[in-house]
Amino acid sequence: MIERLVVASKNPDKVAEMEAVLVASGVVGEIVRGLGWPDVEETETTLQGNALLKATAVEMATGLPAVADDTGLEVVALGGAPGVCTARYAGPDATYADNVAKLLRELEGAADRSARFVTAIALARPGLAPIVVEGSIEGLIALERRGEGGFGYDPVFEVEGRTFAEWGAARKNTMSHRARAINAMVEALRRLAG
Ligand code: IMP
């Protein structure tokens, strides 16, 4: 069991999502909030590499075990793009709307609209080997935006006929790439303890 864990994210929703699963499953005692760390540039070429980079930097800055995640959308017709560049697909200052617009443009006329979301989560612990896990979900890129909820690519990422924005946060969070990656981390920590 990890007594105290830092989640290397400035997004309170992400911290809460990790906390809910990791603490409830008994592999983590508590999530420590309110600590600072320097910004970490995502300079690696893979999701796993970037997650590990962030987790290690925050573990070194805080002296506590730290988890970090990195997510990418991999579109088959685009050869796996935007992948590691998902957040800045339409440029360094791109908004969610810019990224979605570019994706729909690039896929105009594409016969194959299949895609998957992948989340890598890394855990860095002082003096111990890091752990890196992944979670993913297969879907399709819709022809146009649908649904009011969610963020990012949610309005165009379709699973079983509905976009993530149409599913709503509660249902989405039981099946998403990030939820699956968090569950994979729980399993990895249980194996370690067992
Ligand atoms: P991050 O690694 O969580 O910052 O995610 C990278 C980018 O992927 C974000 O800027 C979002 O645009 C997109 N993204 C991540 N998770 C989701 C999701 O659950 N739904 C839609 N878009 C997402």
Image (cartoon, helix red, strand yellow):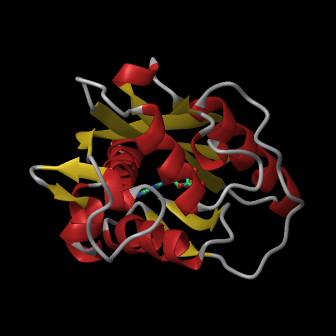
Q: Residue at x 27, y 46 (%)?
A: 143
The answer to which of 143 and 140 lies nearer the viewer is 143
The answer to which of 94 and 13 lies nearer the viewer is 94
Q: Quadrant of residue 136?
A: top left
Q: Residue at x 87, y 58 (%)?
A: 61
Residue 99, position as x, y percentages in the image: 56, 50
Is residue 45 shown left or right of residue 108?
right
Residue 52, position as x, y percentages in the image: 67, 38
Q: Is residue 8 above or below residue 92?
A: below
Is residue 4 shown left or right of residue 151?
right
Asked whether residue 38 is in view, the answer is yes
Residue 126, position as x, y percentages in the image: 74, 47
Residue extending farthest to the top is 79
Q: Residue at x 54, y 61 (%)?
A: 97
Q: Is residue 35 above or below residue 112?
A: below
Is residue 178 shown left or right of residue 44?
left
Q: Residue at x 45, y 67 (%)?
A: 151
Q: Quadrant of residue 66?
A: bottom right
Is residue 68 shown left or right of residue 112?
right
